[in-house]
Amino acid sequence: MSKQLQVDVAIIGSGTAGLAAWRTASKQGKKVLLIESGPLGTTCARVGCMPSKLLIAAADSAHAVRQATGFGVQPGKLTIDGKAVMQRVKSERDRFVSLVIDSIDSIPAENKLSGCARFVDTNTLMVDEHTQVTATSIVIATGSRATYPNDWQQLGDRLVINDDVFAWDDLPKSVALFGPGVIGLELGQALHRLGVKVWMLGRGGKLGPFTDEKVMDYAQTLFSAEFYLDTDAKVQRMHRVGEQVEIEFTDPEGVNEAILVDYVIAATGRRPNVDKLGLEALDLALDEKGTPVVDAHTMQTSMAHIFLAGDASNLLPLLHEANDQGRIAGDNAARFPQVLPGFRHSTLSIVFTSPQIAMVGESYQALELRSQQGGQHSSESGTCFAVGEASFEDQGRSRVMRRNQGLLRVYGELVTGRFLGAEMIAPEAEHLAHLLAWAHQSEMTVAQMLTMPFYHPVVEEGLRTALRDLNANLKLGSAIEDRCMECGVGD
Ligand SMILES: Cc1cc2nc3c(=O)[nH]c(=O)nc-3n(C[C@H](O)[C@H](O)[C@H](O)COP(=O)(O)OP(=O)(O)OC[C@H]3O[C@@H](n4cnc5c(N)ncnc54)[C@H](O)[C@@H]3O)c2cc1C
Ligand SMILES: NC(=O)c1ccc[n+]([C@@H]2O[C@H](COP(=O)([O-])OP(=O)(O)OC[C@H]3O[C@@H](n4cnc5c(N)ncnc54)[C@H](O)[C@@H]3O)[C@@H](O)[C@H]2O)c1
């Protein structure tokens, strides 16, 4: 006979979204239960944001040493100690995980339950086979997992995902990395810079998070010059040969190739963990991928008392999004049935390659779609937005640092001049993107952004060039100024 529990709010998953939901729901004095199947510590700290950035930090340092000769600094022969690299990645990662576990430990025992939850009916969850939980409202915050073609399983332990990479004790000699998306680019470039031979193979020509083809093409040229990259690989055969994998494929020039690699890394996308929740027991509206449809402002599903947050939703799978969504879902689950729309930040995503990649506000593709649908302020040519751009190849500070590669495209609304979004691959993109996201959230016009201070010589002067170009193309202000050498070679 299973144990019975009755609570106000049940939260499934104690990742970033679940913990945020726990904090907001419990502040309202309700009886809240956090259910976790384990392992504890969040995807971000265990196998996501933090270990990937630790690996990238090691790669950046190797890259800086290689680049030093370009400044006349001769650092001598570079040696990479793979065991030491992985040891630091894991020990720092464990430190981050322990901080999360400390905060979970501080949650009272009666508010936590260990086990895998699934729905029995609209208000009842079965946790493993030991406890039945009845809740007035429920937050699904179960995260996501890596997904790849089923037949790759025949590669056994030579097939790995991001989780496995961060468990390595040493760096391998070679990998074939499938999926030049966000995870693929970050891991692939880092491994390459740490001396691992990398073949990066994609499907359908897609690269990174870009929707603006001009920026994507620029990035493709840049990464292809650094490591093997085929964004539309024609793979004929992939099979295990001893402790390695042989891959037969046709390269972009039509030449047949066969390579042997130590590992195949699957970075071919992630899917929300909602398929084993017993959702079939509910009359819940699902999208075409089988994920519950959710209101992005209230985080409510089609069943008013069931909320969804974080990677478990089909919204943007990012840490700060999981945090925002969890906060809103937890708050509304506790105040149910009086739900309120929660505050959402402007869209911001950063990929920690070098140069870095960033997306802010509305994507180029979203704006094109808005134009096609005859969006507000559509011009005679059928678009509702103008584009400005700047190259970083000749940008003052970027050249000083020998990091003068990059392209920034900014979008603004015709008629109103409002800043709408940006896509970029650029030096210091993480900082440029924050400035732009703040401007986007403040609903600034491009002209207002141009009245803001710009120091000299800084990479942000490249941003000003793009904004000036956009302002001219919006036909609301003066055309782009010629380079003003007396003002300093910043733009
Ligand atoms: C390699 C990598 C790098 C990343 N880098 C970044 C980055 O730099 N910046 C960024 O913003 N984002 C990054 N992300 C994305 C970010 O990590 C995720 O968006 C975020 O961690 C999602 O949090 P979550 O709470 O939704 O999921 P999770 O943290 O995965 O939490 C879900 C929890 O639910 C539990 N669970 C699942 N099913 C059940 C069940 N049935 N019953 C009970 N418990 C269950 C799981 O065990 C898990 O603990 C990265 C992701 C990866 C994989
Ligand atoms: N810096 C960050 O913020 C960061 C870092 C890592 C991950 N993330 C989050 O995690 C999410 C998931 O990342 P991801 O890289 O797994 O997904 P993704 O969708 O970004 O990339 C998957 C890639 O795999 C390709 N692909 C799919 N099937 C393939 C196949 N059979 N062969 C070859 N290529 C194939 C796709 O075309 C795509 O390019 C991201 O959307 C992002 O939100 C964020």
Image (cartoon, rainbow, N blue to C red):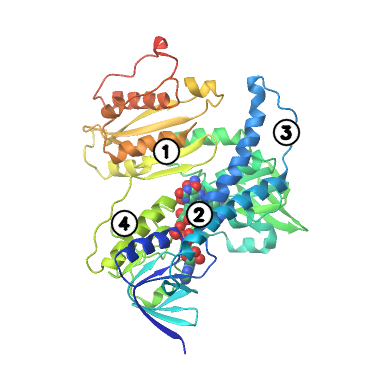
Q: Earlier along the polypeptide chain: callout 2 or callout 4?
A: 2
Amino acid, disc 3: Leu
Q: Nearer the viewer, mark 2 or mark 4?
A: 2
Question: Which residue bears the numbered disc 2?
Answer: 44
Residue 30 placed where, x, y %?
Answer: 31, 70
Question: Which residue bears the numbered disc 4?
Answer: 296
Q: Mark 2 and mark 1: span between their CA atoms?
A: 28 Å
Q: Decide: marks 1, 4 in contact (CB < 8 A)? A: no
332 relative to 241 in the view: left or right: left
Q: Where 184 falls versus 220 (above or below)?
A: below
358 or 242: nearer the eye? 358
Question: Which residue bears the numbered disc 3?
Answer: 78
Q: 10 Å neighbourhood of mark 3: few (<14), some, or many (≥20)? A: few
Q: Earlier along the polypeptide chain: callout 2 or callout 1?
A: 2
Farthest-out residue, bottom: 1
Amino acid, disc 1: Asp
Note whether ligand 1 is within 8 Å of mark 2: yes
313 or 212: nearer the eye? 313
Q: Mark 2 and mark 3: span between their CA atoms?
A: 31 Å
Question: Which residue bears the numbered disc 1?
Answer: 212
Q: Mark 1 and mark 4: span between their CA atoms?
A: 24 Å
Q: Where 433 falls versus 273 (above or below)?
A: above
Q: Where 115 falls versus 449 (above or below)?
A: below
Q: Earlier along the polypeptide chain: callout 2 or callout 3?
A: 2
Q: Mark 2 and mark 4: span between their CA atoms?
A: 22 Å
Farthest-out residue, top: 486
Tag 3 secondary structure: loop
